[in-house]
Image (cartoon, rainbow, N blue to C red):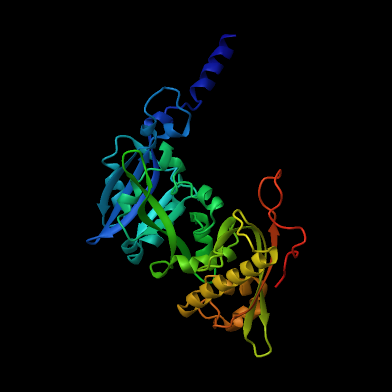
């Protein structure tokens, strides 16, 4: 019996303990990082948030404290050096497992820090691939200090969780670390990053509240901003985007019949066609569902469908012509040919891209299924004798 007891003690003595564990309440949680470049130095801004905002508070305390954020700043000759200089001022160990977003300034991208940031986050063991990227021409630190409305946690802000906002109005698609790495490995070798702008479109009880607006995108390669695409260009891009969920399209603009229609459940297929002369052109085919939330009298179902098709075609053509003239392939036509017919792609590609002309889009065909809208207990807004959905 004594020998067995001694053996058990010896076994217990070699078991590993939790002496090197990190208790959650003793860590500082990084939610976002901003990167700038000034006077030959990399400037790092780190947003720290209160993780209590993720849980329901029953303490009866001030809920506004839950959406507060602290931003620390440090500089260095390199990104690593700036981060370690920031560590020197932190009270506790900074944990990176909850990092949600990165904001880069225009100057940081031009000096190669976009590539450096991707490499660092991809290699570091604590970070995950669900980190969203943004760029701004304004002050990076100011964008990181803006708190969301209604005193919700900073972990649910437009920067930390942009998908919620995008699913309601699919205009500027968010992009995360995983998607950026994939895009940079594709033949085009560039990505589209949402551009942030500080506005004051919301008002509290005492004063106006600053908020973030995303209407433009920056087309970026490893260390170059190829173009900033404005809102009007993005109108056509959103409809071709595969991530599209729902958004509104304006009909009959500039007339008394001016109204909007909600587009959703969209399916898009782009098909490359190799012509006899070797030129490659593309067919765009779309099938969408739409609904009218506010009916204008005197407009029939057929008129709604016809005008919707005309508006979508106009937006797509404008976006393509605008980007094609600037050497951009926003619709990923090169990628489509690469996937569908790699032999033809290899014959005509230059630097991973195929030549595109003004008439490279041969046709746009749109099928619209216009739904009756309103409460189920009410009379449908369309007459059943109106024409059925149109095809074009």
Q: Quadrant of the N terminus?
A: top right
Instruction: Tell me where residue 208 appears, x and y as whole percent.
Output: 33, 45
Seen in the image, is 264 located left or right of residue 234?
A: right
Asked which quadrant contains residue 154, the reply is: top left
Asked which quadrant contains residue 114, the reply is: bottom left
Residue extending furthest left?
39
Residue extending furthest top?
1
Q: In this view, does 7 lie above or below 328?
A: above
* Residue 268 visible, this angle: no
Identified at 55% across, 70% down, the residue is 315
- Towards the viewer: 172 or 144: 172
- Towards the viewer: 45 or 378: 378
Instruction: Tell me where residue 374 appears, x and y as whole percent.
Output: 66, 49
Identified at 47% across, 50% down, the residue is 131
Q: Is residue 6 above or below residue 264?
A: above
Instruction: Tell me where residue 211 appears, x and y as whole percent.
Output: 38, 49
Residue extending furthest bottom?
277
Asked which quadrant contains residue 369, the reply is: bottom right
Q: Is residue 309 above or below residue 273?
A: above
Residue extending furthest right?
385
């Amino acid at each position: 019996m004594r020998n067995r007891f001694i053996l058990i003690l010896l076994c217990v003595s070699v078991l590993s303990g939790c002496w090197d564990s990190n208790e959650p309440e003793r860590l500082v949680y990084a939610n976002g990082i901003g990167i700038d470049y000034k006077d030959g130095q990399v400037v790092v801004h780190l947003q720290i948030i209160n993780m209590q905002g993720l849980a329901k508070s029953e303490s009866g305390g001030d809920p506004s404290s839950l959406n507060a954020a602290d931003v620390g700043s440090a500089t260095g000759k390199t990104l690593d050096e700036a981060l370690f200089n920031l560590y020197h001022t932190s009270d506790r160990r900074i944990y990176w497992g909850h990092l949600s977003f990165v904001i880069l300034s225009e100057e940081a991208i031009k000096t190669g820090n976009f590539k450096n940031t991707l490499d660092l986050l991809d290699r570091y063991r604590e970070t995950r691939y669900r980190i969203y990227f943004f760029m701004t021409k304004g002050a990076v630190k100011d964008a990181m200090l803006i708190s969301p409305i209604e005193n919700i946690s900073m972990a649910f802000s437009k920067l930390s969780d942009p998908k919620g906002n995008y699913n309601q109005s699919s205009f500027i698609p968010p992009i995360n670390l995983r998607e950026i790495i994939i895009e940079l490995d594709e033949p085009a070798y560039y990505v589209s990053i949402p551009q942030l702008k500080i506005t004051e479109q919301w008002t509290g009880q005492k004063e106006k509240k600053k908020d973030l607006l995303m209407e433009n995108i920056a087309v970026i390669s490893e260390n170059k901003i190829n173009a900033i695409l404005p809102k009007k260009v993005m109108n056509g891009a959103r409809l071709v985007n595969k991530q599209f969920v729902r958004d509104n399209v304006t009909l009959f603009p500039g007339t008394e019949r001016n109204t909007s229609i909600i587009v959703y459940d969209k399916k898009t297929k782009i098909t490359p066609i190799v012509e006899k002369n070797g030129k490659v052109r593309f067919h765009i085919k779309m099938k969408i569902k739409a609904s009218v939330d506010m009916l204008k009298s005197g407009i029939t179902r057929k008129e709604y469908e016809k005008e919707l098709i005309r508006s979508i075609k106009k937006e797509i053509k404008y976006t393509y012509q605008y980007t094609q003239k600037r050497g951009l392939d926003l619709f990923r036509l090169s990628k489509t040919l690469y996937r569908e017919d790699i032999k033809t792609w290899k014959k005509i590609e230059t630097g991973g891209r195929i030549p595109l002309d003004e008439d490279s889009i041969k046709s746009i065909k749109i099928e619209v299924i216009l739904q009756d809208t309103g409460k189920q207990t009410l009379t449908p807004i369309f007459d059943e004798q109106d024409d059925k959905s149109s095809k074009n």
